[in-house]
Amino acid sequence: MRSSFGKRSTAEVVTEGIDLRGKIALVTGVNSGIGMETMRVLALRGAHVIGTCRTFEKAETACASVSGLTTPMACELADLDSVRDCAARIKGDFSQLDIVIANAGIMALPKLEQAHGIELQFATNHLGHFLLVTSLVESLAEDARVVIVSSEAHRSTPKGGIEFDNLSGETGYSALRAYGQSKLANILFANRLAKQLEGRATVNSLHPGVIGTNLGRHIHPMLAWTLGLVMFPFAKTIPQGAATSCYVATAPELDNVSGRYFSDCEEKAATTFATSEQLADRLWTASENLVS
Ligand SMILES: NC(=O)c1ccc[n+]([C@@H]2O[C@H](COP(=O)([O-])OP(=O)(O)OC[C@H]3O[C@@H](n4cnc5c(N)ncnc54)[C@H](OP(=O)(O)O)[C@@H]3O)[C@@H](O)[C@H]2O)c1
């Protein structure tokens, strides 16, 4: 089914007429870029948004900057204790979650950095969200929607997709391939969780587009400038960049759609690695071991 929205639709346009009053939405990484706009628009449509950031102070400032009902919380995704604390607080303070948007992310760290011995992009973009979302499964409402923000960068990964024998990054590190691997992990996680929650909640992943946000902060300024020039015709504004997240989280026509990958508010084919059930199962087991 084709949606009536596309690349230039904004988050406000795709949610027009949708009433989210009474719904609780969790969005990670709300102090910047797409996450902040996603929170703003979900709150505008009446949702109570739990907005998480690395620190409570950042979350408090971000939440105070938008109109509507919001609750700030700290969730440093690279610190598993912080993620566990956040999940426990959500379970304590909210009876259920209707929307979860795993949005926060980092890209292309020039040098290898680690958290808990794991390469930092994988640890932040995938493992932190894996722990947060799986810790909250019992809180999901009957018709809940989980949205995992991935990227077209999932097409550019190490050989085999996920380097299970090099999740530390210590036996070879490429900034962009490590980002691609973490974004492939996002899709595999979404697909595997979709299977697990079949008939209960939907889980989908997406590429938001190419948007000038703080995500590029680790890219060398000259390269960023050149990329900016090349990508300019394809680039989206931040309101357009938040549209696919808001569309997948709220569109009535997606009530029973799960385990799919979206871009520009349309379903799109992901790579063979991304749709491999074997790879998804293996990643799930490895992730469980790493967070336990
Ligand atoms: N922009 C694009 O062109 C593009 C393209 C494809 C996919 N995406 C994806 O879209 C999502 C949002 O990115 P964006 O473009 O909006 O980037 P952004 O402006 O840099 O926002 C990223 C958010 O993630 C947070 N974050 C980073 N590391 C974190 C950690 N360890 N714990 C908790 N929060 C953390 C950031 O917090 P701080 O500000 O405190 O670091 C910020 O709030 C990401 O998943 C990204 O991979 C973006």
Image (spheres, grey):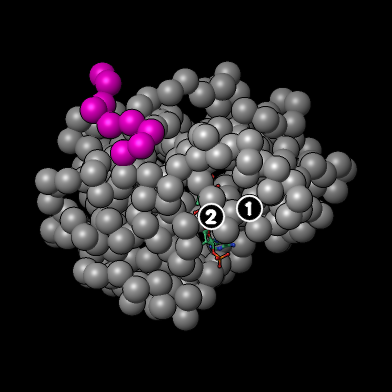
| Residue designated by label 1 | 216
Label pair 2/1, CB-CB below 8 angstroms = yes
Rendered location of residue 53, percent (x, y): 48, 68
Q: Is residue 119 above or below residue 162?
A: below
Of 21 and 15, the residue lying toward us: 15
Residue 145, magenta (yes or no) = no
Report whether the residue tagged 1 is closer than 8 Å to ligand 1.
Answer: yes
Residue 6, magenta (yes or no) = yes
Residue 44 figure quarter: bottom left
Rendered location of residue 47, percent (x, y): 21, 59
Of 32 and 115, the residue lying toward us: 32
Three-letter amino acid code of the residue under disc 2 = Thr
- Residue range in magenta is 1-9
Three-letter amino acid code of the residue under disc 1 = Gly
Of 207 and 184, the residue lying toward us: 207
Q: Is residue 102 visible?
A: no
Using the image, tell me which numbered label, if any, was put on residue 213. 2
Of 106 and 281, the residue lying toward us: 106
